[in-house]
Image (cartoon, rainbow, N blue to C red):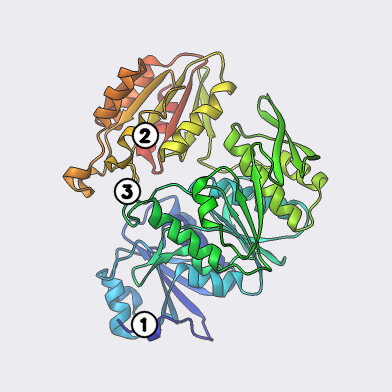
Amino acid sequence: MDMTRNIIPEAVRSIHLIAICGTGMGALAVLLRDMGYAVTGSDQNVYPPMSTFLEEKGIRLFHGFSPENLSHRPDLVIVGNAVTKDNPESVGVMETGLSFCSMPQAINRFLAKGKKRLVVTGTHGKTTTASMLAWVLTSCGLDPSFLIGGILKNFQSSARVGSGPHIVLEGDEYDTAFFDKGPKFLHYQPDVAIMTSIEFDHADIFRDLDHIREAFHALVSGMGPDKVLVAWDGDQAIDEVIRDARANVVRYAENGNCQWRLGNDTLEPPWSLFEVLKDGDLFGEFRVRMPGAHNLLNALSVVAAADELGISADVLAKAFETFEGVRRRQEVRGIRRGITVIDDFAHHPTAVRETIRALRPFYPDGRLIAVFEPRTNSSMRNIFQTEYAASFAQADIVCIRKPPLLHKVPEGERFSSQQLVDDLKQQAIDAHYFSDTEAIIDFLTAEARSGDLILVMSNGGFDNIHERLLDIL
């Protein structure tokens, strides 16, 4: 491969994106179009709503991958991280001599250049935390740019080009591209970074927790003494990663002796009310329309970062009150016959446990029915087989689907939904195994009653189970 062409030319007018229909790539494509570039793109699965969204923005889409999609010879090709070196268009880029780059490289050049970079990292909570931070900056008139892996309800968008001096980026530890196997977040060189947690995940590219820690350590090592690292004080892996940090490290926690911590908190549905203490003194009182201790900690990290930017407690309080949340993060999709259906992105055992624990107090009069689809590269592997059995303790009924893409995992490494159900039954939990989505819908239609909460957890579309279930109900 000729890596000398892995460079962005000084003069760029036309840009082509391979695998444009991914959430991040699609958002980037729209931002580039809004900035005045001629944008085209291709993908294997080009269908609504992403296809219509992109086409309405004036972006020409090619269905499928082919060297012919490059016949207009764009000035630059952005290669998504899901694209392999054997992809027909990847081969076409190499054969035609076009300049190419990864998505993080493009973000650095076209979006982040000259901006103060606020990067949110961690195994859990990146999207929600980055979204809150972007809204806080917007609320106080700083007009930030942002690119986040979820749809912010306040903007009905996952990305925006602002005129202000800041950009908020969700810093993903996943690899960058087939020609760059390093984590995406290493490209962003944060001025302020938030680190929410470090756990083992992404089993398709990381060997173990030590391998994950190496990636985060590389990020921290690149931050000099003029940078700020806001890190959760409740994670041994984080402690190890930041031990030799040169950056100004600011710690936050639920309790303890660190600089930022939570004070008293109460529930007044739909609000979570909480105090924030700075160096032991009351900094402010806040309320957010999000349940759960993990979301209060996400908000606390934003408070700590915002304080470093000179944003007052009063401004933060108003921003939190008007923050509408993120799609697919504890999102109420509808209520039918008194039955509430919520969609959540949870897929890691810790995320599943904390999501159930967060929502349980908000629905005290009915049952919490947890519906889980193992779909990620990690959740379809048996590495978390035992851990998942401890994640559903606060659910009244549990429905586990057979992983839909299990054929992609070597037979000896496959997760067993049936084994999970058996393990849950051993704990006297009312658990059920399903081989397909249709059977789950039939079960829920017959079983659910007024007052119940149906919590659907998956990182994928789950065969549109939410809308189908609401229609039947």
- Distance from the alpha carbon under mark 3 to that under mark 1: 29 Å
Q: Is residue 29 visible?
A: no
Please rate how many residues cluster around mark 1, counting C-alpha atoms within 10 Å: few if below 14, some from 14 to 19, many from 20.
few
Q: Amino acid at mark 1?
A: Met
Give above or below for 429 relative to 327. above
Give above or below for 423 relative to 152. above
**In which quadrant will I find the C terminus?**
top left
Q: Amino acid at mark 2?
A: Glu
Residue 117: which quarter of the image?
bottom right
Which label belongs to residue 3?
1
Relative placement, left or right, of 199 versus 245 is left
Which label belongs to residue 377?
3
Q: Earlier in the sequence, mark 2 or mark 1?
A: 1
- The residue identified by callout 2 is 387
Give above or below for 333 relative to 101. above
Q: Nearer the viewer, residue 257 or 285?
A: 257
Please rate how many residues cluster around mark 2, counting C-alpha atoms within 10 Å: few if below 14, some from 14 to 19, many from 20.
some
* Residue at 27% in and 27% down: 434
**Which residue of the protein is positioned furthest toward the left in this rendering?**
411
- Distance from the alpha carbon under mark 2 to that under mark 1: 42 Å
